[in-house]
Amino acid sequence: MNSYLEKVKFLTVILMLCFATQQAQSADTLSVCSPSGKICLKVWLAVELHYSIQYAGDQIIDASAIDLLLDNESSLSKSAVIRSFSIKKIKEQIISPVPEKRKIIPDQYNLLTLQFKQPYSVEFRAYDDGVAYRISTRFKDSIIVKDEVARFAFKDQASGYFPEIPMAGNDDPFKTSFEDLYSFKKVSAFPSTSIAYTPILVVTPSYPKIAITESDLEDYPGMFLQGTGKSRLQGVFARYPLEEKVAEALYSQTRVTKKANFIARTKGTRTFPWRVIIIAAEDRYLPGNDLVYRLGAPSRLNDVSWIKPGNITDEWIIDINLFNVPFKSGRNTASYKYYIDFASRFGFDRIMMDAGWSDNNDLFKINPDIDMDTLVAYAKQKGVKIAMWTLALTLDRQLEAALQQFNQWGVDFIMTDFIDRDDQVSVNFHKRITEACAAHKIMIMFHGTYPPKGFNRTYPNAITREGVLGSEYNIWSEKVTPDHDVILPFTRMLAGSMDYEPGMLYNANKKSFRMIEGIVYSQGTRAHQAALPIIFDSPIQFFAGNPSQGFLEPAYMELIGQLPTTWEETIILDAKVGEYIVTARKHGDNWYIGGITGWTERDINVKFDFLNVGDYTATFCKDGVNADHYAADYLLEQFKVNQQTELPIHLAPGGGFLLKIERLKNF
């Protein structure tokens, strides 16, 4: 019966479209709905191409314009005539080689494609969890894109979470590390003198949550959003760099010194990035959303068997400030051997040798206090891999020779840092470096850059990215709060995995937090830190705490060090943006549940009805009774659970919990 109704509904949509097409040149509206019929998209041509979106019959996106402006004064909308359209019902699935949220990803949508008499087409996809569109061109020769029109019109009462960058007094607002706090304000109050990078999240009192971002960003600048003084945002893009200059510093970078009056110089026949509108009726549907990944171009790697995600240690945040050791700690052979011992003892796959293992400007000028041959041999003996930090400018200059050296050392994962741009040249840098790494079977993580935006589907060895205000800010600021943590899963994480680097072992409440270099505290409880690897997507999860403290807490570290980083399934059990989140993830036969709250303490109830029939052993890390005063107070417990179990949990201010649910062998 359901199948029959579905066919009737789909045929009805097709008939509506056929009728609309007969009148298309008279500006009549074309329509397409999502498979469930809840989300409907209307498209029409009136000077510019416009669209609007309805959810359950209510309009949630008002008339919004689409256009592409070229340097020869032509544009998508100029004298546009819709020659034809087609609609297709797509029902596929994606098997993710590096599953951030789930291994098998359903990919179901209805596709409306408009072919123009001019060499353009526009695709619209209507999913049950959002809408996406993109422009395609069919010019024989290369083209210059002067600008793109991407407008998003919301209801007057709409507010949003924005990572805002003021333009006033800013030499180049597009130079950013994409590491900002999300401020909450009316969309109409977001100024035209500021820009925000995506994703942003829009909320209204009566309608679903709406997130705006992009996917399949390639050979094109990233999209920022700008206020208009109304309940409308518009896309803005970094101009194409005509001249660049190296700014010499401890971490040297290439700076743009002259910009063109256009945004891209590119092939004439191509598809442009998807403009993505994620729609969630409930807050808990946002953190598990993988629409951006689905819209990424399919993998271009034939063999992905060598891609091995996992846990890793890092020393940069604590500045290798070790204690209870018989050697002088620092960037030296003895300290890195200590990290290798720690990783081997507690189940970490790798250690990171962060900035300082070599001259930042020359990867072959190794720190004289480090014997790489000794470390490589010692790591191999202990079954631990070594990963390396690089400066992006240096890696680009020494790329092939450096990758060959990393291969000789057995390095299969590197980080490159300090990019701070997403203009067309910078976007192409990411692709070039990733392809070179793939040829050497090396995974890469980009720091100081924009979110993945589907790139991790196209190149699975681009395993994760930063582009988030994370743990390192505890060194020098008070920005990284539990309230910030409970915004990220609903905003930044929608664009792909993020390297937050949790695991801080010195913890403080709101009053006791201090910025102390070398003895770095996190805000919130220890159990809050324990939950973050479950809450935040990242197939490479960094442990940023002090291993000397970790050795003093073996039971805790055995739990943290052996957490999986890829997942067969993800379920958000409960969540409210900016307040709390509870996430359950499956790996093999086991489940892992993480929950965090902002600075407001709360009581929650976890049900285990998602488990299969049978008994499980739960290892429980929770806030201790004194965690509201002494944030590092936690308890470890073990007990049995099954489908019928309900577990009440109290979360301290800035608190959290971690549950490891292991299936008993006799079931």
Image: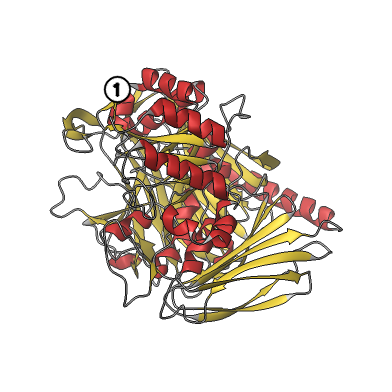
Looking at the picture, how far across and down is residue 611, in whole percent? 76, 63
Is 350 situated above or below 181?
above
Residue situated in front as seen by the camera: 635 or 192: 635
Is 443 situated above or below 166?
above
- On screen, residue 246 versus residue 319, left or right, reads left
Residue wearing tag 1: 397
At x 77%, y 54%, the residue is: 6
Q: Residue furthest left?
A: 169
The residue type indicated by label 1 comes to Arg
Q: Classify the position of the N terminus by image quarter.
A: bottom right
Residue situated in front as seen by the camera: 48 or 391: 391
Which quadrant of the structure image shows residue 488?
Answer: bottom left
Residue situated in front as seen by the camera: 167 or 19: 167
Label 1 CA crowd tier, 10 Å (few <14, some 14–19, many 20+) = few
Regarding residue 72, the answer to whether it shows in the image is no
Looking at the picture, how far across and down is residue 262, in whole percent? 26, 33
Looking at the picture, how far across and down is residue 223, in whole percent? 36, 45
Mark 1 lies on a secondary structure that is helix
- On screen, residue 292 versus residue 467, left or right, reads right
